[in-house]
Image (cartoon, rainbow, N blue to C red):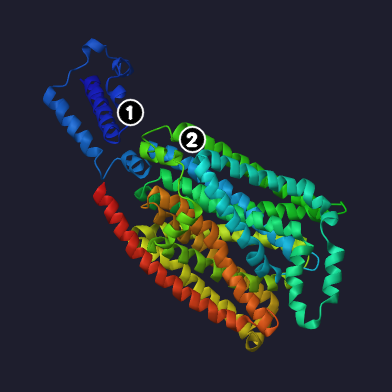
Amino acid sequence: RLRAHAYDCTYMRVLRLTAALCLAGHAHALALARAPVAPLAAAYGMRPQAMPRLAPARSAQLSMQAAAAGDGKGGPLAKLRAKLPPPAELKKVTPLGAMFFFILFAYTILRDTKDVLVVTAPGSGAEIIPFLKTYVNLPGAIGFTVFYSWLSNKFSQQQVFTGLVSTFIAFFTLFAFVIYPNAAALHPTAAVDGIVAALPAALAGLSAPLAIIRNWTYAVFYTMAELWGSVVVSLLFWGFANQVTKVEEAKRYYPLFGLGANVALIFSGLYVRFVSGLRRTSTAADPWAGSLKLLMGGVSAAGLVVLALFQYMQKKVMTDPECVPPSAVKQSKTKTSMGIKESAAYLASSPYIRDLATLVICYGMSINIVEVSWKAKLKAAFPNPNDYSEFMGAFSSCTGAVTLFMMLAGQRIFKNFGWGAAALVTPTMLFITGAIFFSLILFGGSLSPLVAALGTTPLMLAVVVGAAQNILSKSSKYSLFDPCKEMAYIPLDAEAKTKGKAAVDVIGNPLGKSGGSLLQQAMIFSVGSLAASTPYLAGCLFVIIAVWLRAARSLNTQFTAAMAEEGAEA
C-alpha cells in the first residue's frame, strides 16, 4: 500500500509537470506524457503489471490540477516563454541586430578618426569643418544620391547593398595602406603655403577652405566616413530593415537594436583608446600611420562581417515566409523606375516626406552648430593627435554607455506614450543641453570663482560640459530619433520608401549640416571668428529647434493617420 501511494504521488507530479509544459508550449511534453512508466515502478520496487491504475475521473482531476498549476499566474516556464520573441521573429531580428552592431562599430571608429585627421592636420583646425561640410560633403552626398538612384534602377537591393559596402571597405583599406603613407607627395603643401602667405589680412578667413586643398586626401576620407553614416547606416541598413519588419515589430525591436549597437560604441571606443596606447610605446617615425592601419583594419573586418550577415539574411531569412512575407521579398527585388527629376517632383509634393526631411535637416543643423564650437575648444585642450584620439575614444565609450540606458527608457516611452512623444525627446534634449553649454561659454567670466573652486580651468570645463552635451544629444538621437524616423517610413509605399529615404537621409542630413556650416561661415566672415559668433549661433540654434518641434507634431498626425489606414486595409 505504501509503495502504491508513493507511486501515486510521483505520478501526480509527472502529470502536473506535463500539463504545465503543454500550456507553456513545450514540444517535449507529449513525449513525456507517453513515456514508459516502468522506470518509475522499478524505482519503488514494483512490477509494471502490479502498478495501480487511476480511475478516469481521478486522471481528469489530476490533469485539471496540473493545468491550474500552469495557468497565466503560475508556470515560470510559461512566463519566460511569453517574454521571448516567437522563433520566426528571433530568426529575423538577431542577424539584423548583429548587422547594426558591426555597422556602428565601424562608424564610431571612422567618426573619431576623421576628426583627428582634419582637425590636427598642418594648417588646419576646427574652423575647417563648416567648409568641409558645405563644399565637400554636400556635393558628395548629392552626387552619391544620383548614383544610388541609377543603381536602384539597374540592380536589385541585394546587389546594391553588397556592391556599396564592398566599395567602402576597399577605400578605407586603400587609404590606410597606400594613400596616407604617401600623403606628403600627394598634398600640395608648398603651393598652398605660398597662397596663404600672399593673402591680405582682410581675406584671412580663406585659410580654412585652403586647408581643404592642402590636405585634400584627408578631406576625401572625411567625406567617405560621413557617407558611411548616411549611406550604410541610414540608407542601406534601415532601408533593408524597414522592408522586412512590420510596424508592431519595429516598435518592439528597433529600440532594442540600439542596445547591441551602443555596446558597439563602447567597444569601438575602447578599441580606439587601446590603439592610442600602442602609439605611446611605438618607436616608428610616424606612430599615427601604424595606428591608422589598425583602426582601418577594424573597420574592414566589421564591414566583412556585415556582408556575411546580409548574405545569411538573403539565404535563410528572406526565403522563409514565416519570417518575411512574400510581398516584402518581391518588394526588395523590385527595381525602381522613376528618374531623379520625377522623384524630386514627387517627394516635393509630399508633406509627409517634407516633414521627415525637416526633422533630419534640423537635427543636422543643430548638432553641427554645437559640435563645431565644442571641437574648437577640444583642439585647444588636446593639440596632439594621440591625445585627441584617446579623448574621442573615451567620448565614444561614454556615449555608448549612456545610450544603453536611453534605449531601455526609449522602449518604455514608445510603449506608454507613443511615437509623437518619442519624437519630441531629442529636440528637447538639444535645447536644454545647448542652453547650458552656450551659457557656460557666454558667461564664463562670471563663473571663474566657481571654476577655480572645482580645481579646473574654464577651457577644460567647457570641454567636459560640451562632451556631456554631445553625449546626451547623441544618445537621445540613437535611442529615440533614429527609431522614430525609421518607423515613419514603414507605412509608405515602395517608391516613397526607396527614393524618399535616399533624398531624406543621403541629402537631407548633409544639407542640415551644411546649413549649420553656412551659418557659421557667415558669422565668421561677419564678426571675424568662431568665438565671436557664439551668441548669434545660440539664437539660431533655438529657432531651428522650434521649427523641428513643429515638424515633429505635424508628422505625428500624418503618421497616426497612415497607420490607421494601413490597419483598415489589413
Give percent across and percent down for residue 505.
51, 57
Q: Residue at x 49, y 45 (%)?
A: 97
Give percent across and percent down for residue 3.
25, 20
Can residue 169 be seen in this snapshot?
A: yes
Query: Is residue 119 positioned above or below 439 on the image?
Result: above
Q: Which mark is residue 27?
A: 1
Q: Which mark is residue 36?
A: none
Q: Is residue 370 left or right of residue 498?
A: right
Assess disc 2: are there few (<14), some (14-19) or many (≥20) residues with their C-alpha within 10 Å of its C-alpha: some
Q: Amino acid at mark 2?
A: Gln
Residue at the extreme bottom of the image, as rendered: 446
Give percent across and percent down for residue 448.
66, 86
Q: Is residue 320 left or right of residue 188?
A: left
Q: How many marks?
A: 2
Q: Earlier in the sequence, mark 1 or mark 2?
A: 1
Q: Which mark is residue 314?
A: 2
**For residue 533, what is the image quadrant?**
bottom right
**Which structural element holds mark 1?**
loop
**For residue 273, what is the image quadrant?**
bottom right
Check if mark 1's residue and mark 2's residue have beta carbons within 8 Å: no
Can residue 404 be seen in this snapshot?
A: no
Separation (CA) of disc 1 from disc 2: 29 Å
Assess disc 1: are there few (<14), some (14-19) or many (≥20) residues with their C-alpha within 10 Å of its C-alpha: few
Q: Amino acid at mark 1?
A: Ala
Give percent across and percent down for residue 82.
33, 43
